[in-house]
Amino acid sequence: MDNVRRDDPPHRGRGARRCIIGVLTGLLLCLPTATATPDSGGRTPPRGSAFMGVGVLAHDGTAPAARTPADARATHTEGVDVSSHQRDVDWKGLWGDGVKWSYAKATEGTYYKNPYFTQQYDGPYAAGLIRGAYHFATPDTTGGAAQADYFVDHGGGWSADGKTLPGVLDIEWNPYGSSCYGKSKSAMVSWIRDFLNRYKKRTGRAAVVYTATSWWSECTGNYGGFGANPLWIARYASSAGTLPSGWESYTMWQYTSSGPKVGDHDKFRGSLDQLRTFAKN
């Protein structure tokens, strides 16, 4: 069997590929990029490589027409989310495509900082987008308060300038091990509460909670006590579907992982003016 070299890190998004070069044959094979998780039978990815929605396709899949949300009852404003996998992003191009807001991964656990964060956080601001930062939670490594501090100290803060969105807690499937990070439902709820309380104390804003309904049900027992925090729901379909307990509506919705340019595309539930108001307050 040929020895191989793999490009690292892979780019995510439409048309993303992982290329494998056979050292003996010299052949170049390019395959669609896929995220391997312990639950899907693939190799465990390295710590720090997680991204928003890493487990959604593997666990929830996708429904037809995911690229064309059909919730006509609400006005939506287009957004994107990115991580180090996208590297330097063409923010002016996204603005020209109608994207008005973005989130960049800032941190993971208390051990990882996104090396592309400056370009992915300051770039959209300069291009006219309203920007924010997210933290990928790893409840199996350190406590919720410690991770909130790490997030705020490394890009996850907030300011009332009308162009900076509140920070996001990305709490979802564990790409490095068991789905619920080895925690009981009550222990997971306590961890999330510790993070949210510390973030609010540090910044004065309630953090947005990004999650998927099926993960929330499995790992928190569908706990309904965090409704005061804005919800960012993950569901790759033509509607956001059933929401986790405690939320009557979503604030953001990640509706596809295969949108133009960067892959992950999202909807803010409201107009651009409402988005600016949300950023300020």
Image (cartoon, helix red, strand yellow):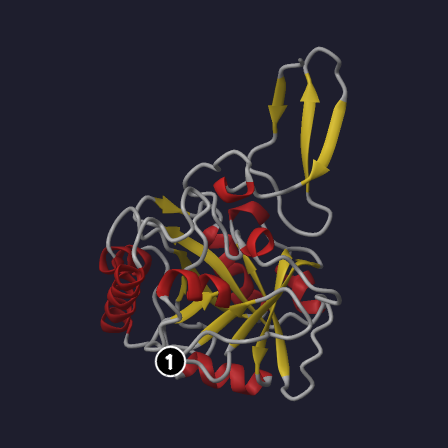
Q: How many labels does the image show?
A: 1
For the C terminus, the quadrant is bottom left
Q: Which residue is drawn at 66% across and 60% down?
A: 62
Q: Can residue 87 be seen in this view?
A: no
Name the foreground residue: 123 vs 270: 270
Q: Which residue is drawn at 32% across and 49% down?
A: 182
Which picture quadrant has residue 272?
bottom right
For the N terminus, the quadrant is top right
Q: Mark 1 points at which residue?
A: 227
Which picture quadrant has residue 238?
bottom right
> As displayed, is residue 197 above or below residue 85?
below
Q: Residue at x 42, y 77 (%)?
A: 245
Q: Position of residue 51 (x, y in %)?
A: 50, 52
Q: Name the secondary structure under disc 1.
A: loop
Tell whether 24 sits left or right of 279. right
Tell whether 223 sits left or right of 12. left
Name the foreground residue: 107 vs 222: 222
> As displayed, is residue 110 above or below residue 222?
above
> As displayed, is residue 61 above or below residue 234?
above
- The amino acid type found where label 1 is placed reads Gly
Q: Is residue 136 visible?
A: yes
Name the foreground residue: 164 vs 22: 22
Q: Where is residue 256 in the image (x, y as percent from the top left)?
A: 65, 62
Is disc 1 surrounded by few (<14), some (14 to 19) or many (20+) residues within 10 Å?
some
Tell whether 6 sits left or right of 194. right
Name the foreground residue: 187 vs 9: 187
Q: Residue at x 30, y 60 (%)?
A: 188
Toward the top, the furthest residue is 24
Q: Where is residue 194 in the image (x, y as percent from the top left)?
A: 24, 65
